């Protein structure tokens, strides 16, 4: 009698552990893609109050080189020393096509609050400085355009032309 009670207890215990594990993995799977949706809509829509003048972009670059380059790399290539050390896989900030769906407000929010392994700068940089950083990042995309749709189409054509 005791033995049966013990066996059923063990079985119950095992199945509840399995259940808890399932729940835990479900949770982490559904959390991963939610990172972007954490930015409140009103923050994402927030207009950039600082015009991308030469002096704004220059100040942004100055701040970037001291605060961001160690991760995001020279000119935003995503290959900073710290990013390599931390094994971060960073987006190329020069890739205008990849960033075009992000608003200035979203960048401002990420720079202010941080995201994942990135620390927020709200306590250390003024709002204007953070908008200057947004303006600098935008200037990177226009400076070094990634492979365009046209160039791709050309590639495809030359492939077709081969016998
Ligand atoms: C410790 C390394 C680190 C530092 C320093 C850092 N970042 Fe980031 N940054 C990241 C990581 C990691 C992400 C991607 C976060 C994610 O998607 O989970 C990111 C994302 C971003 C993004 C969103 C676009 C993208 O690539 O996903 C912007 C814009 C950005 N960083 C700008 C900055 C600026 C400006 C600074 C300097 C004030 C800065 N970062 C400093 C690590 C860093």
Image: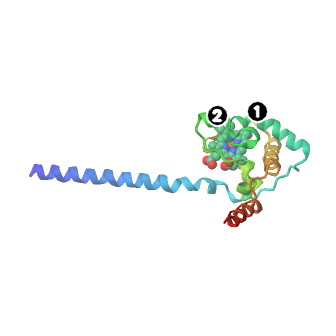
Residue closest to the eye, 152 or 108: 152
Neighbour class for label 2 at 10 Å: few (<14), some, many (≥20)? Answer: some
Name the residue beneath numbered marker 2. Answer: 82
* Residue 119 at least partly seen: no
| The one of 89 and 119 positioned closer to us in this rendering | 89
Q: Is ligand 1 less than 8 Å from the beta carbon at label 2? A: yes
* Relative to 9, residue 118 above or below: above
Q: Is residue 47 visible?
A: yes
Whether 6 is drawn above or below 71: the answer is below
* Residue designated by label 1: 66
Task: Name the image quarter holding residue 114.
Answer: top right
> How many numbered tags mark residues here?
2
> In the rendered structure, which disc, 1 or 2, sits on the residue that comes first in sequence?
1
Residue depicted at x 21% and y 51%: 9
Say few, some or many: other residues with alpha carbon within 10 Å of mark 1 (under 14 / 14 to 19 / 20 or more). Answer: few
Q: Position of residue 4 (x, y in %)?
A: 12, 53
Q: Position of residue 155 (x, y in %)?
A: 72, 60
Question: On the rendered structure, is 9 left or right of 73?
Answer: left
Ligand 1's quadrant: top right
Give the SS element for disc 1: helix
Please identify the residue farthest to the left as the structure is shown.
Answer: 1
Residue drawn 54% across and 53% down? Answer: 32
Q: Nearer the viewer, residue 147 or 54?
A: 147
* Image coordinates for residue 120, horizontal then vertical, percent: 68, 41
**Residue 30, x across and y down, in percent:** 50, 57
Q: Is mark 1 within 8 Å of ligand 1?
A: no
* Residue at the spot 70% in from the left edge and 47% down from the top edge: 92
Nearer the observer: mark 1 or 2; the answer is 2
Question: In the drawing, does residue 66 fall left or right of residue 16?
Answer: right
- Which color scheme does this rendered protein use? rainbow
- Residue 154, by quadrant, is bottom right
How many angstroms separate mark 1 from mark 2 (CA)?
A: 13 Å
């Amino acid at each position: 009698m005791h033995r049966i009670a013990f066996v059923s207890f063990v079985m119950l215990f095992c199945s509840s552990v399995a259940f808890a594990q399932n729940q835990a993995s479900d949770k982490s799977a559904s959390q991963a893609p939610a990172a972007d949706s954490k930015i409140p809509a009103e923050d994402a829509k927030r207009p950039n109050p600082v015009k991308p003048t030469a002096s704004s972009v220059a100040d942004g670059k100055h701040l970037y080189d001291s605060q961001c380059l160690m991760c995001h790399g020279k000119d935003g290539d995503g290959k900073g020393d710290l990013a390599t050390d931390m094994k971060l896989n960073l987006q190329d900030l020069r890739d205008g096509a990849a960033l075009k769906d992000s608003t200035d407000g979203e960048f401002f929010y990420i720079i202010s609050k941080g995201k994942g392994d990135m620390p927020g700068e709200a306590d250390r940089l003024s709002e204007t400085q953070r908008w200057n950083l947004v303006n600098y990042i935008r200037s990177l995309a226009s400076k070094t355009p990634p492979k365009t749709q046209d160039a791709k189409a050309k590639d495809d054509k030359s492939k077709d032309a081969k016998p």
